[in-house]
Image (cartoon, helix red, strand yellow):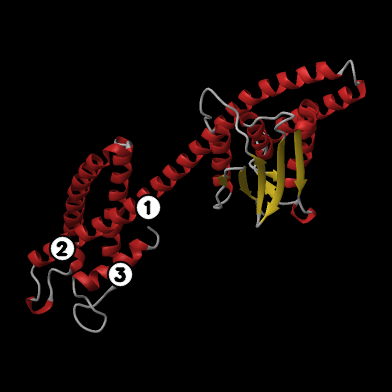
Amino acid sequence: MIIMIPVLAFLIPIIFFGVRFNRPVYYTPEIFLNTFLTTAVVWIGNRWIMIWARNRYPEFGIVGKRLLVQSGVMLAYTFVATNGLGFLLKDYCGMANLPNGDRTLGDILISANSTSLFCSLTIAAIYESRYFMSELKRSVEEKELLKRESLHAQLDALRTQINPHFLFNNLNTLTAIIPDDPETAVKFVQQLSKVYRHILEVKDEPSIPLRDELSVLNSYAFLLQTRFGQNLHVKVEIEDALLEQKVAPLSLQLLMENAIKHNVVSEDHPLFIHIYANDGKLVVSNNLQLKKQASESTGIGLENIRQRSRLLTDKLVEVVAGPEHFIVSIPLLQN
């Protein structure tokens, strides 16, 4: 309003009423002040009408009804305000009595109402554009927030599913090794504690340094190798220069859990898991020896990793299921 009302008040007499600085009808301070007052009254009144209409019809689904009611009230107000002020301000800025009878009062009325209609359309266009852009931005932000909350819910549900089974299996393993190897049992409990402490620490983090993810992965691998013995082989080859880059937390744990869940791990069919970096991605590869399962996998683990990665980078998680190997590549994130 601070910018547009003075600008319109200055331009309206020139564009719509033909006033000039170098010939009659001359542009005078009185003309500018009168036009400024009319423009301000029309602008502010229409602005309040739009605010009233949005409060009266706040739902985005009935925007058509709001615009119809709003437009009718704005046009009525603009007509009354323009002609009322025109009568009070000496026949529209004192321009009814022009030299040589150039323009009649009827001409002035037509120009004044046309001008007010133009102003009303300009006001509506400016405010409605801002309103719709604001609503669009809010809608996108709400959609993104809901998406993030949904992913958090999925991740929490995934943890709830994995942790009881993981804890149950590890307690069984611990029970088996306590009588024969107490020292290993103590180390087993320490590593189990480290894994669960890590889960609690990163549960609200979108990403963590690769160094931290690999640290807990070593503990996780120790638990699995204690359980499966020489039937499971885990090899990690990551350059030190990449350790400060980031990944979504628990990604490696979920992928290793998937490999154990879907593949046979036995003396006759040992499982080899290889973790390495290649072309800006963290790669987890395992030999493929699928279990015979009664039902198909839901794929919730991989989909969860895909969606979390989508929020952090435009690079995609790649999955390659070959005849002999299953390979998942996760984008590494720069600090």
319 vs 35, left or right, is right
The answer to which of 84 and 172 lies nearer the viewer is 172
Residue carrying label 3? 10
Give the numbered dot on residue 91. 2
Report helix, strand or loop for mark 3: helix
**Percent position (x, y) of residue 310?**
54, 46
Along the viewing direction, whichever of 214 and 137 lies nearer the viewer: 214
Q: Amino acid at mark 2?
A: Asp
In the picture as drawn, the residue positioned furthest to the front comes out as 268
User: Which residue: 20% across, 44% down?
Assistant: 68
Q: Is residue 71 above or below residue 254?
A: below
State if disc 3 and disc 1 touch (CB < 8 Å): no
- State which mark lies toward you, 2 or 3: 3
| Rendered location of residue 140, percent (x, y) | 44, 45
Residue 314 image offset from top left, x and y in percent: 54, 52
Tell me the distance, in whole angstroms, between the alpha carbons under discs 1 and 3.
24 Å
Query: As shown in the figure, which amino acid type bears the numbered disc 3?
Result: Phe
Distance of mark 2 from mark 3, alpha carbons?
18 Å
Q: Which residue is mark 1?
A: 130
Is the residue marked by circle 2 packed among few (<14), some (14-19), or many (20+) residues within 10 Å? Answer: some
